[in-house]
Image: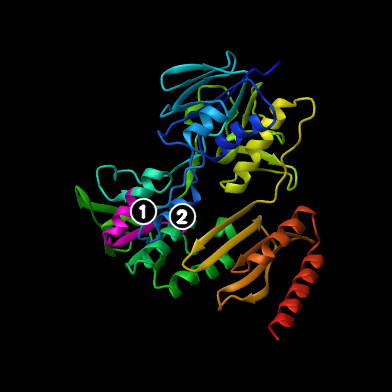
Amino acid sequence: MTVESLVVVGASLAGLRAAETARKSGFDGAVTLVGAEPHLPYDRPPLSKACLEPAPHGAPDTTFRTEETLRDELGIDLRLGAEATALDPDARIVVAGGREIRYDALVIATGARARTLPGTEHLAGVHTLRTADDAKAVRSRLDAGARTVVIGAGFIGSEVASGARKRGLDVTIVEAQPVPLVRAVGSEMGQACAGLHHTNGTDLRCGSGVESIEGTGSVERVRLTDGTVLDADLVVVGIGADPGTPWLESSGLALDNGVVCDQYLAASAPGVYAAGDVARWTNPLFGAPMRLEHWTSAAEQAAQAVKNILDPAAPKAYSTVPYFWSDWYDTRIQFVGVPEADEVVVVSGDVDAGRFVALYRREDRVVGALALNYQTHIMKYRTMIGKSATWSEALQFAAARNAAELSRAR
């Protein structure tokens, strides 16, 4: 089927990259970009980083492109403030903002939605941090000197804590698990990352649950399951996100922790693809299904999905080494690969000093690497993982880098 109309649902990074890639690839048909939020596409990682930093001129503008660029230069039909509510893949129709939009090819890029704590909707000062409006509300409370409690010691919550501490504010992180970040970096390295909070004066309480969040009109306190009561003017809930698939439940598409896709990012209906946080695709490099909530993969997946749409006779599988980063206090945390490993070994630096590289071994392969303040090393390990390097090759590389660093220091 000839593609004359491309519809992209989701106007964040993946959606924008999909629309841009279509034009850069020479597609001259109709491109419609549908977004639930009224804002132009914007960058999300700064929302919990630079947008929360104390700055004399306020939060930075994270908008990717101007409206003139999108509408006039790229010829994109922008449908903002139009939440998608239904998909009929047989008729090739998306319903968004109460209107039907027909497509020949569709890219689903509806991302993920932050999980909330039920029963807190009536309290001002209780926020998730997923959207530009969320970041604006959280920043306003921090600017006012809020006593801050963060629920969840993941990357979003930890970045919020960092922003609060840079203002000199008291902040407590409540984490239900005994060790934070187990799913992201493993238990041993999760404990090492937790040390950054203690070093920077954040009160991290692991193994504690939230019994209730209380207040009259606005949040006043957080009551924990162990009886502890924490005074709070701001509560940020960072307990993960769920893929943005509720609108697809009646569509007949295969859904399982995201839109189920093959290695080419094609979903289970003709002409439908997915990219970004909402896509659960088979990663050929690891031979396993994955759903990644990472900036890099969102951009890459969207571009590849559109290229496969426009050249269906020669599709290319999307294969990647996962990569993410986070900024806590004055530390850059980077991770490549996957954390499921038989062994984790620190090969450079010192955990106690807060600057190190740890490698993750599965059988005879290196499958992951975590770096704290070792920016020059991490991408080399990503390349090695992508080439299925052996464990001994990774250790030899680490030894050579360590020797070179020592030589420069003399």
The answer to whether 89 is drawn above or below residue 200 in the figure is: above
Disc 1 to disc 2, C-alpha distance? 9 Å
Q: Residue 137 in the image: state x and y as whole percent.
A: 32, 49
Q: Residue 328 in the image: state x and y as whole percent.
A: 48, 64
Graded by Cα atoms within 10 Å as few (under 14), some (14 to 19) or many (20 or more), the crowding at tag 1 reads many
| Quadrant placement of the N terminus | top right
Residue 146 or residue 69, whichever sits in front: 69
Q: For the residue labelled by badge 1, is the local secondary structure a helix, a strand or a loop?
A: strand
Q: Horizontally, is 25 left or right of 20 in the view? A: right
Quadrant in the rendering for residue 7: top right
Graded by Cα atoms within 10 Å as few (under 14), some (14 to 19) or many (20 or more), the crowding at tag 2 reads many
Q: Horizontally, is 152 left or right of 28 in the view? A: left
Q: Could one spot residue 10 in this view of the protein?
A: no
Q: How many marks?
A: 2
Quadrant in the rendering for residue 352: bottom right
Q: Could one spot residue 346 in this view of the protein?
A: yes
Residue 391 or residue 158, whichever sits in front: 158
Which of the numbered marks, if any, corresponds to residue 156? Answer: 2
Tell me where the magenta segment starts and ends, as one range: 137-154
Residue pictured at 62% horizontal, 66% vertical: 371
The stretch drawn in magenta includes residue 49: no
Q: Residue 36 in the image: state x and y as whole percent.
A: 43, 31
Q: Horizontally, is 390 left or right of 154 in the view? A: right
Residue pictured at 58% horizontal, 40% vertical: 276
Residue pictured at 45% horizontal, 56% vertical: 50
Q: Earlier in the sequence, mark 1 or mark 2?
A: 2
The answer to whether 81 is drawn above or below residue 44 in the figure is: above
Identify the amino acid type marked 2.
Answer: Ile
Residue with the mark numbered 1: 236
The answer to whether 264 is drawn above or below residue 217 in the figure is: above
Q: For the residue labelled by badge 2, is the local secondary structure a helix, a strand or a loop?
A: helix
